[in-house]
Amino acid sequence: MKIPAVLHLDIDAFFAAVEETLDPSLRGRPLIVGGLAHERGVVCTASYAARRFGVHSGMALRTAAKKCPQAVFRRGRFHLYSRISRQFFACLRRFSPRVEEMSVDEAYVDVGGSRYLCASVYELAARIKAAAERETGLKISAGLGFTRLGAKLACEAAKPGGLFWLHDEEEFIAQLTLDKIPGVGPQTYFVLQGLGVRRGRELKGKYPAMWRKIFAGLGSGGMERGRPEPASRSFSRETTFPEDIRDQGLLYSHLAYLLDRLAVHLLGEKLFAGRVEVKVRFSDFSTFCQRAALPFPTYSYFHLWQSVLPLLRSLLVKKDLPLRLVGVKVEDLQAGRDILPFFSLRDEKMTAGIGSVKARFGFSSLRSARSLLLEDLYPIEREGMVLKTASLTK
DNA sequence: TCTGGGGTCCTAGGACCC
DNA sequence: TCTGGGGTCCTAGGACCC
């Protein structure tokens, strides 16, 4: 008999559930985490009580407030969630050495190798789920399958809070409408509908090659042995302004702030960036990015800033509209470099020094002059750092 | 009704080289 | 004057996920 080998677990309405455990008066009430009702932003997580009003994640906060005026709105407390998330994964790793973290609240566990811990794999899955629920204090849904896709779909079917074993994956997927398949988004679904294909069965019959392509990644086999931990490929920081801005000083200082955060993160991860990208979104929601390879891989705030400036300038002339968002991303991350250009050492040492001060006294203890809106005092192409003695002396 | 922030992966076209 | 084909690198943009 074929034995299911993949378990998918997903914490139910994670952020909202954490807020409920910390404030029991919220239990059973419609709760929306992501921002306040009047703010510019979207719903991160809606409690099941809020979902009954048609609120779902990704919905604009103001829309959610209209649909469910009695809802409680909370901004997220993400450091808290990530602490519980770490407990969740630590618990899973006690049962299997092969755990794949898919997001803060979602994981695949290879239970094939651990099945002798229990009389049956189903029993083992139930034990893992119960342990994770006990240790996090949260409700968890779980799905058992022969493949990741099967396990994921089983978990979907188990929500909220259940455990489901999908015995016949092929048949289940054949009757499913394709928008329920992970990886088939609105665009693809729209195109498929145009081709007269709505369910798995029709796709398999009419376009077997496309069917195979969709399942190439998710559907094939269980969890491979020796799959390397995926390394980070990029880091980004971006901000949507509360109101669209035209003020260039504000824009440049905010970009400096975002870049400052990225440089600290790179330093903490001991990675060099090979490429940098700037992103802007205008008030009409049109979005543009511009990226460029760096002259040499670096984590230096100063070097990154030199490369970022011309990118931002060429983006700003795309449209004569106020800006809604600015963001910056570093890519092509690498752990080391073949050749260390000697002229880069000084700025990198400075970034590292600044980083250690920030690590000890907090991110805001040292800020780039530009990010403090003091750009009048400094030449535009050159950055200075300002010591905020008030934060250092406490 | 207005649309976050953090990611991954893929494709297409142009530049450049042989 | 007309000019192939293949490979690689780079950038822009988009689909998708949580």
Image (cartoon, coloured by chain):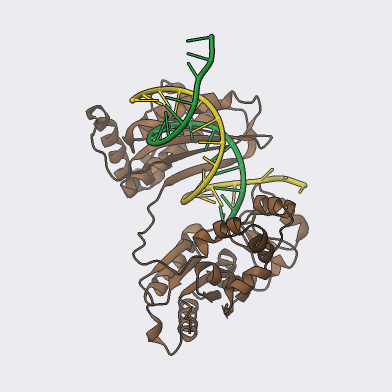
Chain colours: A brown, B yellow, C green
Q: How many numbered marks appear?
A: 0
Residue at the (50%, 68%) spot, across then down: A148
Q: Which of A219 and A211 is in front in this view?
A: A211
Q: Residue at x 51, y 59 (%)?
A: A216
A53 vs C14: above or below: below
Evaluate whether residue A135 shows in this view.
yes
* Foreground pick, A227 / A47: A227
Q: Position of residue A247 (x, y in %)?
A: 59, 27
Locate residue A45, reporting x and y percent. 61, 61
Decide which of A196, A328 is in the foreground and name it: A196
Q: Can residue A20 be seen in this view?
A: no
Residue C8 position (above or below residue A223): above
What x and y, as percent, mark residue A365? 38, 42
Residue at 45% over, 30% down: A308
Q: Quadrant of residue A65?
A: bottom right
Residue A282 relative to residue A367: left or right:
right
